[in-house]
Image (cartoon, rainbow, N blue to C red):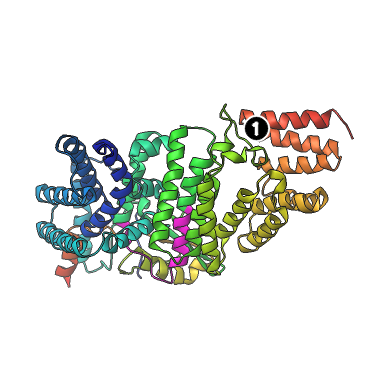
């Protein structure tokens, strides 16, 4: 027989996985973010005290829900500061009525039905465009993600009081500005869903791309973004872009171990040990992508996931199907034009049609000036010029790239190339 | 003639002492009472601080919603609508339909619903 689960581990896992669900239902019922979050937090504190002593309850999730509800009711009863006594009593009556309805639901149906909808409401409220972007991210992680305020502060390298203040202001704005707690109606849904996906992708990238900060916390951010992505796909199974984003995150996360060397330096895609890639994540991501593409409503996340999948499927860097990648970038530029995407297309074009054709694209971008402070533009241009034997121009471009690079490992990489071209004046 | 009197000032911080706030509120109530009794009060509301504001623009037919107050220095206040909607989304949709949203900006500021507003009471007494 396996050993009984450690209550502390159970509480920790439950907090990550279930607190968003419980908070979501309580917010609907109470109409108050702070009260709901505090009640749920208290319930977990009680669980940490009791479960190691008394053993685990039969259904820990339900226990948390009941305890949080009772705490919220206690708080409402104790609250004397609410000026309008009648409103308070009305709210309290509402809590008791609605929650007992939920209890009944839970008894009859499986736990997903009424509560799942609450979580979807919460996602859309936390990601409402009337909130500042940094507050959307913090609120999503704190309220839905079950990350604590200190954890989020550490992940985003901001002082804890700053982050706490950000959360307070966000909750206040939700209340004062009348941001609705609901899934947006159909005519608003495409735009709002984009906003939600953007927040999740931002959380993922913060964990994936950051070159500073605590490695474990960054890993947590990626895991949270993927977990929330799964929740969203579970709640909106017919939205191909939501599935596309989840696939994209998994297909990138699969390379996590291989993209860092033992000194914490970044390893480029073509130099990574592909044996270290997470096959399970690649398989899951690829299957999700296929499911999304079958819906025949392509979008930027699906295309980016498709590009990541082509890389992930290549057994060696040399075996990469660059023609397919270049084609996917061409479609991506059509769907979501951006100079950064165009630059990536140029890299793929260089692999398929040679540096000449690619340089034409990059020179056009360079002339536009929009990416003048983007080191990859100058680095890519330098590489293409070097391959074409135009070493003097290449050296100038490497120097410009160097000016824009602060990371030591990346600087060293450019310096080697610069020395190379300076050694062979053309 | 009708005139719109716009009140500008430093935003009260959360830490403002309560007696100071009550004092200011009483002064506002006295002013409102006075102009109401003289029959020249038409409308007036307190606004939530700018942190609760949302700015709406329409460009190329797309509604762009950004958090925070309107912050361009080139554009100037040109008019206002006071509307009652069920939530912020509905207010944003209305804002996007204002012709000025297509070239300028519409700032959506929630009204601060004061508990049992004396302003409203005074207004009701005068009619």
- Report which residue position mark 1 lands on: A410
Residue at 44% across, 56% down? A196
Which image quadrant is residue A53 in? top left
Quadrant in which the C terminus of chain A appears: top right
Q: Which residues are magenta?
A: A176-198
Residue at 48% across, 46% down? A204
Query: Helix, strand or loop at disc 1?
Result: helix
> Which percent across, then down, holds residue A323?
73, 56
Give the camera-side residue of B94 and A75: A75
When the figure is inspected, residue A404 is found, relative to residue B5, above or below; the finding is: above
> Which percent across, then down, holds residue A214?
46, 32
Q: Is any part of residue B11 visible from this angle?
A: no
Indicate left or right for A89 with A289 as reference. Answer: left
Give the camera-side residue of A131 and A265: A265
Indicate left or right for A366 with B81 as reference. Answer: right
Indicate left or right for B51 with A421 as reference. Answer: left
Which image quadrant is residue B96 in? bottom left
> Which percent across, then down, holds residue B23?
19, 46
Look at the image and say whether residue A166 sits in the magenta stretch.
no
Indicate left or right for A124 with A415 as reference. Answer: left
When the figure is inspected, residue B5 is found, relative to residue A166, above or below; the finding is: below
Q: Point out the residue furthest to the front here.
A: A1
Quadrant in which the N terminus of chain A appears: top left
Q: Is any part of residue A255 visible from this angle?
A: yes
What is the count of numbered marks? 1
> Which percent across, then down, holds residue B95?
42, 67
Give the camera-side residue of A322 and B102: A322
Give the camera-side residue of A42 and A371: A42
């Amino acid at each position: 027989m396996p050993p009984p689960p450690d209550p502390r581990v159970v509480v920790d896992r439950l907090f990550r996985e279930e607190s968003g669900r419980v908070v979501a239902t309580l917010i609907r019922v109470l109409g108050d973010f702070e009260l709901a979050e505090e009640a749920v937090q208290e319930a977990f504190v009680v669980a940490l005290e009791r479960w190691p002593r008394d053993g685990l309850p039969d259904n820990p999730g339900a226990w948390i829900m009941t305890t949080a509800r009772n705490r919220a009711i206690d708080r409402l009863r104790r609250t004397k500061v609410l000026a309008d006594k009648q409103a308070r009593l009305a709210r309290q009556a509402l809590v008791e009525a609605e929650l007992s309805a939920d209890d009944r639901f839970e008894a009859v149906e499986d736990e997903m039905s009424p509560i799942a909808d609450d979580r979807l409401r919460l996602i859309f409220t936390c990601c409402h465009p009337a909130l500042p972007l940094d507050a959307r991210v913090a609120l999503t992680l704190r309220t839905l993600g079950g990350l604590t305020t200190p954890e989020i502060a550490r992940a985003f390298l901001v002082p804890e009081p700053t982050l706490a203040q950000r959360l307070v202001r966000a909750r206040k704005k939700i209340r004062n500005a009348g941001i609705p707690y609901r899934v947006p109606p159909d005519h608003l849904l495409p735009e709002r869903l984009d906003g939600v996906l953007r927040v999740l992708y931002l959380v993922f990238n913060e964990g994936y791309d950051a070159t500073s900060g605590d490695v474990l916390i960054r890993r947590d951010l990626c895991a949270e973004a993927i977990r929330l992505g799964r929740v969203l796909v579970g709640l909106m199974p017919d939205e191909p872009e939501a599935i596309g984003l989840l696939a994209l995150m998994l297909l990138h996360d699969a390379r996590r171990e291989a993209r860092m060397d033992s000194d914490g330096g970044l390893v480029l895609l073509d130099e990574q040990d592909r044996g270290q890639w997470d096959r399970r994540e690649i398989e899951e991501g690829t299957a999700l992508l296929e499911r999304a593409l079958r819906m025949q409503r392509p979008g930027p996340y699906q295309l980016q996931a498709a590009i990541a999948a082509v890389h992930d499927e290549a057994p060696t860097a040399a075996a990469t199907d660059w023609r397919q990648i270049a084609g996917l970038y061409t479609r991506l530029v059509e769907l979501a034009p951006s100079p950064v995407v165009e630059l990536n297309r140029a890299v793929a074009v260089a692999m398929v049609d040679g540096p000449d054709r690619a340089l034409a694209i990059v020179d056009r971008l360079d002339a536009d000036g929009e990416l003048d402070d983007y080191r990859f533009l100058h680095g890519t241009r330098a590489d293409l010029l070097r391959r074409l034997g135009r070493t003097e121009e290449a050296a100038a471009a490497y120097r410009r790239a160097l000016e824009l690079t602060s990371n030591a490992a990346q600087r060293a990489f450019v310096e080697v190339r610069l020395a190379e071209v300076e050694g062979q004046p053309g | 003639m009708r005139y719109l009197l716009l009140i500008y000032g430093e935003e009260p911080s959360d830490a403002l002492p309560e007696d100071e706030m009550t004092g200011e509120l009483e002064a506002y109530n006295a002013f409102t009472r006075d102009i109401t009794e003289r029959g020249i009060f038409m409308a007036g509301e307190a606004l939530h601080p700018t942190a609760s504001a949302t700015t709406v623009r329409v460009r190329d037919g797309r509604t762009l919603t950004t958090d925070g107050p309107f912050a361009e220095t080139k554009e100037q206040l040109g008019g206002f609508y006071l509307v009652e909607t069920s939530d912020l989304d509905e207010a944003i949709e209305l804002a996007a339909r204002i012709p000025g949203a297509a070239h300028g900006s519409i700032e959506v500021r929630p009204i601060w619903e004061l508990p049992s507003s004396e302003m409203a009471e005074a207004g009701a007494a005068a009619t």
